[in-house]
Image (spheres, rainbow, N blue to C red):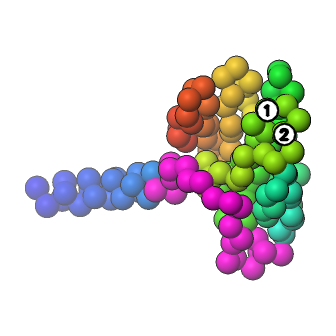
Amino acid sequence: MPMLSRVVRRAVLPVALLATIVFAPATASAAPPAGDDARAAAAACSITRGLYTGAYLCETTTLRTFTWVDGRQEVFVIGTDNQVWHIWQRYSGDLFWSGWYSLGGYAILGVGLWNSAPTIAVIGGFDNLRYCNGWTGLSWTGWYRC
């Protein structure tokens, strides 16, 4: 029985760690936080939408702009903390925007949009697998393997 217990613990720990890193809940914030990591700080670019400025990783695959059918824009970035952040116009022509909100996750291979109806954000995770987070019309589903 002790051997089974060790096997179960070894199997559960990586899953629990993955759930903590990849499926982190979305939280609101005024701007994407800057990372402590020297590599991230060296590769940080500034982005301003409306009244809100944040920092993101400079690689071209870490910034995506999506335009809704009604003309509103939504921007997805990988922040210097490697989490996915987004900001959107509340209506077409909105000069103030929503503020930056985290979708959590831990992306290293870029952020993209898979679909527009429904909107599905896609990232490459730390384990080199793809993860999706879909907009249901009311909330985000949370990250799942796609």
Circle 2 sits on which residue? 94
Q: Between residue 118 and residue 38, name the one nearer to us.
A: 118
Asked if residue 33 is among those painted magenta in the image, a careful observer would answer yes
Q: Residue at x 79, y 39 (%)?
A: 89
Q: Main secondary structure of the magenta part?
A: loop
Quarter of the view holding residue 79: bottom right
Q: Is residue 146 left or right of residue 124?
A: left
In magenta segment, residue 51: no
Q: Residue at x 81, y 48 (%)?
A: 96
Quarter of the image with the C terminus is top right
Cα gap from disc 1 to disc 2, whole angstroms: 5 Å
Say whether residue 127 is left or right of residue 116.
Answer: left
From where the camera sits, is residue 127 visible?
no
> In the image, which disc is placed on residue 132?
none
Span highlighted in magenta in the image? 20-42
| Circles 1 and 2 in contact, beta carbons < 8 Å | yes
Image quadrant where one finds the N terminus? bottom left
Residue 51, x across and y down, in percent = 82, 56
x, y percent for residue 93: 88, 35
Residue, disc 1: 91
Q: Position of residue 124 (x, y in %)?
A: 68, 47
Q: Mark 2: which amino acid?
A: Asp
Residue 66, position as x, y percentages in the image: 82, 34
Q: Residue at x 59, y 54 (%)?
A: 28
Q: Is residue 19 visible?
A: yes
